[in-house]
Image (cartoon, grey):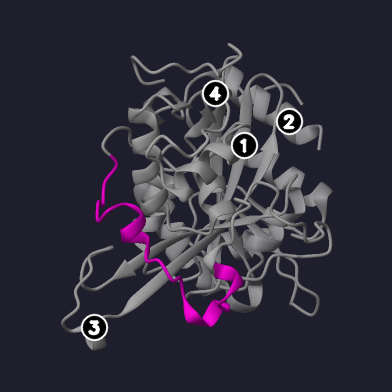
Amino acid sequence: MMPPEEPPKERWPEQPRPSWPEQPSHDRFLDDQAGPMVRPYVMTSGRLEPTRGKFDLITLVVAAGPEPDGQLGLGPEHVSIMRLCQQVMSVAELTGHLDLPVATVRVMLGDLLDKGFINMQEPEPEADMHDIRLYKAVIDGLRAL
Amino acid sequence: MVSGLSSRDSRGRRLPTAVKIVIAGGFGVGKTTMVGTVSETKPLRTEEVLTDEGIGVDDISGVERKKTTTVAMDFGRITMRDEYVLYLFGTPGQERFWFMWDEVALGALGAVVLADTRRLSDCFPSVDYFERRGTPFIVAVNCFEGSQQFDLPEIQMALNLGPNVPVMLCDARSLESCKKVLIDMVLHAMKTRGLAPAPA
């Protein structure tokens, strides 16, 4: 683990993860040192790449419908993603909330996209960074902070 | 938007577009502090797992030789009007994780290289990286207490920066200071890309 600097903690009090699945999760029984009980590649059935979509870190994802009830051949992590994606969320945020590696989350997002359970918005390609509205919106947004 | 994929949510609303700014610099220079100062949510951490046996491949034999490294990046979010969401990514402290840098720098609006005058050389790799890549960037000198104050032209010279790269002083703990750094960076990115800067 290569720890970046610790984020400042005072501004955001620790909150329980509201979107985490309610069934007992493996991390209740193990401390951080033990590592995950289910390795990430098991969650993806050994797949390394998503079947569809590229899923940049800032690709925005939103659920196409309500949370599935778990009878659709989805794993618990898929269902967790669907819960989190009831609000628009980036791939990076999903990995942060789920505490899973980016590659793992990408594969599962590909599954959900395949099944039509999520919609997504890719970021602007680098070649399209000449839209002046984008810059003005960012400057206005920063000034409003 | 990718053709054939809806960019509207289930209620028919158009999804916003995400943009990102990279905060780079040496270890401990205040990248995560800056991300946290401006982020509207508690900064999150995204992780990429590397193994020297191939990412995610299970290999029972030779497990004792297998080294797993986790590279983590902290990032924050600022929701803007006009259908945009801004993400700020702090790069991993170690410059050797270039593959992560490539992923974060791709499609970035621009970058802020944070520098500490006590360890100015720590930011050389970041400066080199964005220069090579052609990503618009500015250098912001985080003013730590007890650090010797230098003139900005001295720093510009010490970093061997081109005259077009803005250098400014900042305090990564101050919202106003971070806002100024980010706004100046966006203005610089506009200029670099040949767009008229917005009137102040």
Residue type at the position of mark 3: Val
Residue ID for mark 2: A141
Which of the marked residues, 2 or 4, is nearer the chain's N terminus? Answer: 4
Q: Residues within 10 Å of mark 4 (few under 14, many from 20)?
A: some
- The part of the chain drawn in magenta is A27-50
Disc 2 chain ID: A
| Residue at the extreme top of the image, as rendered | B12
Residue type at the position of mark 1: Leu
Residue type at the position of mark 2: Gly
As measured in the structure, the alpha-carbon distance from the residue carrying label 2 to the one carrying label 3 is 49 Å
Give me the residue at 78% from left, 61% from top: A14
Q: Residues within 10 Å of mark 3 (few under 14, many from 20)?
A: few
As measured in the structure, the alpha-carbon distance from the residue carrying label 1 to the one carrying label 2 is 9 Å
Disc 4 chain ID: A
Query: Dot 1 lies on which element?
Result: strand
Disc ID at residue A65: 4
Q: Residues within 10 Å of mark 2 (few under 14, many from 20)?
A: many
Give me the residue at 51% from left, 64% from top: B159
Q: Are the residues under marks 2 and 3 on the same chain?
A: no
Query: Dot 3 lies on which element?
Result: helix
Disc 3 chain ID: B
Q: Are marks 1 and 2 in contact (CB under 8 Å)?
A: yes
Query: Dot 2 lies on which element?
Result: helix
Q: Is residue B136 magenta?
A: no
Residue ID for mark 3: B63
The answer to whether A105 is drawn above or below residue B8 in the figure is: below
Residue ID for mark 1: B86
